[in-house]
Image (spheres, rainbow, N blue to C red):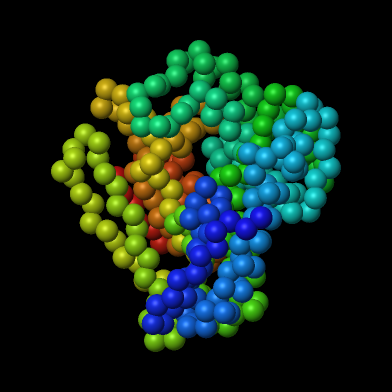
Amino acid sequence: MDYCLQLTQTSDLCRVRFPAMASTCEVIFDTTDATLALALGQLVQEETQRIERHLSRYRDDNIIFQINNANGVAVVVDDETADMLDFAATLWQLSNGLFDITSGKLRAIWHFDGSDNIPEQAAVDAILPLIGWQKVQWQRPTLILPAGMEIDLGGIGKEYAVDKTYDLVKSQFKEAFLVNFGGDLRVQGPRKNGHPWQVGIETVTDENNNNMQQQETIIDISHGGLATSGDSRRYLLKNNQRYSHILNPLTGWPVVSAPRSITTIAPTCVEAGLCSSLAMLMGINAEAFLEEQNVTYWSIR
């Protein structure tokens, strides 16, 4: 199915856009060859749609649905899914259980729509027994997920798609280009004019102080990936307290004292997304964590 692939052109660039993964996805090519840009954009769109079909939790015809509805029966997965599960298991270990792909069950009670609808502790307590990667039996390529539990690869899926499509374009296009899926991106540069790509970090607002403004930061980047984690669009607000959509799977509640936004740069988009996500999960220690890892970052509190 074709989802509105759009091509726009300026004096020195071609941009291809399409919707996928609940985001606007785009590739910007440092070329004026619109025919080439459109052909490459179609390949990117097809690969992105393939990944989304394969790994989305919103479908009822893929391996994720099969796993989540197996009721405790063993499921043998394909190599791509196995790679993602191996990566998720590594992240769970590195974060001491804070990054957990089984935590999606909390969506049933947490709805980050900007309202003041905070769930009762009893509702959180009822779901916590269905969360915890340590309860999953994973021996590649076989996974046994206890009945009632779910997995959700959304926390790493978009960054994975960025890197996969980046590799696809790089194999056929030798000039500079930028892959951007909803603000998570990867670039090849510098551009023909010798300049790096310029990327803006989204500003945040303060619901308690409408006059507060954050000056936009422009980042120069010629190689590598960039990712941002934050709560600018998904949050709850009650009694002047903001509840981030980033949940601690050990408590079932939003992470406390995390930055409003963390942006990181790394060799790949997956690595950048890993760093920004883990930093947010560290709460008040987000910046200290990134400094320990020697990661280039921008933080907004």
Quarter of the figure with the N terminus: bottom right
What's the residue at 49%, 32% (across, down)? 248
- Quarter where residue 61 is shown: top right
Please state if 252 lies on the left or on the right of 57 as rendered.
left
Residue at 60% x, 73% y: name it. Answer: 40
* Quadrant in which residue 107 is drawn: top right
Q: Nearer the viewer, residue 46 or 125?
A: 46
In the rendered image, is residue 179 in sight?
yes
Task: Please tell me whether residue 122 is drawn above or below residue 9 in the rendered image.
Answer: above
Position of 48 compared to 6: left or right? right
Q: Which quarter of the figure has residue 13?
A: bottom left
| Residue lying farthest to the top in this orientation | 122
Res. 94 in view: no
Q: Residue furthest left?
A: 211
Nearest the camera: 280 or 185?
185
- Front residue of 170/247: it is 170
Residue positioned 51% across, 65% down in the render: 6
For residue 98, above or below residue 166: above
Residue 34 placed where, x, y %?
A: 52, 79
Residue at the location (37% across, 70% down)? 198
